[in-house]
Image (cartoon, helix red, strand yellow):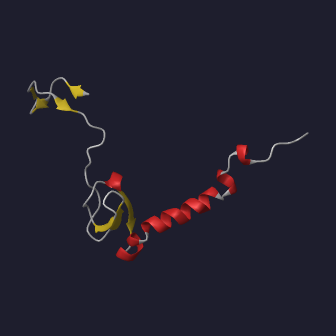
């Protein structure tokens, strides 16, 4: 989707400007650690776009365990009764 007219300094320029929802802008600060799922590596601060990262983590070691942490949390959530669907319950033969 494009804007039909762009205003600069209160006057219209007539240029079309894309209106992107996801700009791929990097977020994060030095001292924050992330795991990039696209490049499969630990990074400090804003290297890759946020959509490709897990974190932030408090240190490099925690970031390096990001995939293990995600797997462990998935198992916990899959076994949490609060998240189970009623479809998983045995049907009443009655």
In the rendered view, would you say 18 is above or below 45?
above
User: Quarter-wise, where is residue 93 in the image?
Assistant: top right
> Does 8 sit left or right of 56 as displayed?
left
Residue drawn where x is 86% and y is 42% of the image: 92
Residue 2 appears at what percent x and percent y? Answer: 22, 27
Placement of the C terminus among the 4 image quadrants: top right
Q: Is residue 77 or residue 8 the one in the foreground?
A: 77
Given residues 76 and 25, the one toward you in this image is 76
Q: Is residue 14 left or right of residue 29?
A: left
Residue 70 sits above or below residue 9 on the image: below
With 5 as the anchor, is 33 left or right in this view?
right
Tag count: 0
- Please report the residue visible at 8 percent of the width from the left and 27 percent of the height from the top: 13
Residue occupying image coordinates x 49% and y 67% = 69
Residue 42, how many percent across, how many down? 32, 68
The residue most toward the right is 94
Name the spot of residue 12 as percent of width and height, x first. 10, 25
Q: Residue 59 location in percent, x, y? A: 36, 75
Q: Quadrant of the N terminus?
A: top left
Find residue 10 and report its image quarter.
Answer: top left
Residue at point 24%, 34% (across, down): 19
Note whether 20 is above or below 47 in the view shown. Answer: above
């Amino acid at each position: 989707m494009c804007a039909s007219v762009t205003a600069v300094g209160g006057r219209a320029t007539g240029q079309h400007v894309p209106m992107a929802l996801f700009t791929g802008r990097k977020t994060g600060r030095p001292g924050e650690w992330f795991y990039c799922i696209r490049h499969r590596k630990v990074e400090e601060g804003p290297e890759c776009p946020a959509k490709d990262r897990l974190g932030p983590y408090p240190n490099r070691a925690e970031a390096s365990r990001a995939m293990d942490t995600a797997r462990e949390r998935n198992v916990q959530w899959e076994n949490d009764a609060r998240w189970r669907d009623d479809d998983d319950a045995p049907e009443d033969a009655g």
